[in-house]
Image: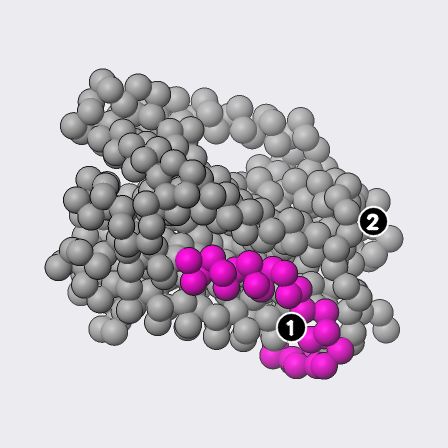
Amino acid sequence: MVNGAQWRQVPPRLFRSLPRFAFGAGPHGEAMLHFDRKTLKNLDAVLLFSVVCLAVLGCLAVRSATHDDPQLIGCAGKQVLWATIGVIALMLASLVDWQAFERLGGWIYGANIALLCAVFIPGVGTSAGGAQRWINLGFIQLQPSEISKAAVSVALAVWLLDHQEHVHEFPTVIRSLLYIAPPMLLVLIQPDLGTALVFFALWLGIVFAAGARMRHIVSVLGGCVLLFSLAWAMGFVRDYQKERLTAFLNPDLSPLDAGYHVIQSQIAIGSGRLWGKGLFNGTQNKLNFIPEQHTDFIFTIVGEETGFAGSVVVLMLYLLVLVRGVAITGENENPLGTLMGAGIVSLIAFQAVVNVGMTVRMMPISGIPLPFLSYGGSSMVSNMMMVGLLLGIGMRRQKLTF
């Protein structure tokens, strides 16, 4: 285990360079759940407010996207329920003494792998649309890959903390990538390429914050590009995935197939103009021109019905979440909190950028949901839990000394 002096020799480069926004922190106990008035004073109200606003806007967008579709009646009510449960999960996660994860990293990693494997067990896992991603719990379809994002961020942070003294060495960087390879492969088999890419973004954010050398990170990125090119050439990437990844370059080549999503998304967002058509009044939405408009393409509802103005508001809320997350991470005096925060911020940033980017034809279609807005219970609760952990890191940012 490294001490504070050793850690400060390799400060998180990205976070130390940004302005400081977090408040001071009070003492905290050894219990897994801890409440203290002094720590509560350090609650980041801006981060909490921004996330709650996004969840409320998400419920409204889901309501608009589903209220005219008989097959999706009830989705809006479920989204409100999941948002409520998510806020409760956020509050509980903020009370967690996250430093206890230092002793539980291996258990969390093992439980995560077991949960991802369970989706392939007959009678346990369920499939939809050709994908095997869910576990039927009766009252909910649990998607382990969503829960896995939070689990991997914690487990990888603990692993890197244990190997901090060697993080400047290339073999350690490779081993850290191999550490997240099992969950990535299990998600790819489902298949879910988008979530697998999220894991890679998570890894990139944490190893960067840990102080890995830039040339090592670039070498790994180059190797991954090469491996993906080989997988593409050898047919390991499925045809529909290839079409999704290339359609955004020229959607007119297949306007009724892979390019259809991109074309209709652009039409919907563009038709919103400056102020939009009004909530629940989107014509592209009502006529069901946009596929998966309540999940992957939820941002098209925002663009069409609230226009450029509403879209900017949503993007500014995401920016506030990321700025506050970076500030909390950068001011944390505990190495584990810094690494966990870096992973959480990387996850939210990557998902938001890729999802919004694909709706405006700046990114390939990847099936990555928009955090806090897209319909889905597992995604909502998982993202809220991660924000709760981030709030807890901010409230207990000072490292304990004895």
Q: Quadrant of residue 358?
A: top left
Q: Is residue 359 left or right of residue 216?
A: left
Please, is residue 240 above or below residue 356 in the view?
A: above
| Label 2 packing within 10 angstroms: few (<14), some (14-19), many (20+) | few
Residue on which the image places disc 1 = 97
**Which numbered dot is residue 8?**
2
Residue found farthest to the left: 70
Callouts 2 and 1 close, C-beta under 8 Å: no
Q: Secondary structure at mark 2?
A: helix
- Secondary structure mostly seen in magenta is helix
Q: Nearer the viewer, residue 198 or 5?
A: 198
Please, is residue 138 above or below residue 394 in the view?
A: below
Q: Nearer the viewer, residue 402 or 68?
A: 68
Is residue 167 in view?
no
Q: Secondary structure at mark 1?
A: loop
Please state the horizontal and vertical placement of residue 213, each as a whole percent of the image.
70, 33
**Per the image, is 306 magenta?**
no
- Point out the stretch of residues depicted in magenta: 30-57
Please state the horizontal and vertical placement of residue 283, each as a whole percent of the image.
23, 43
Q: Quadrant of residue 80?
A: bottom left
Between disc 2 and disc 1, whose residue precedes? 2
Please state the horizontal and vertical placement of residue 249, each as a whole percent of the image.
35, 21
Q: Looking at the image, which residue is at 70% across and 81% down?
A: 36
Q: Looking at the image, which residue is at 64% across and 49% down?
A: 323
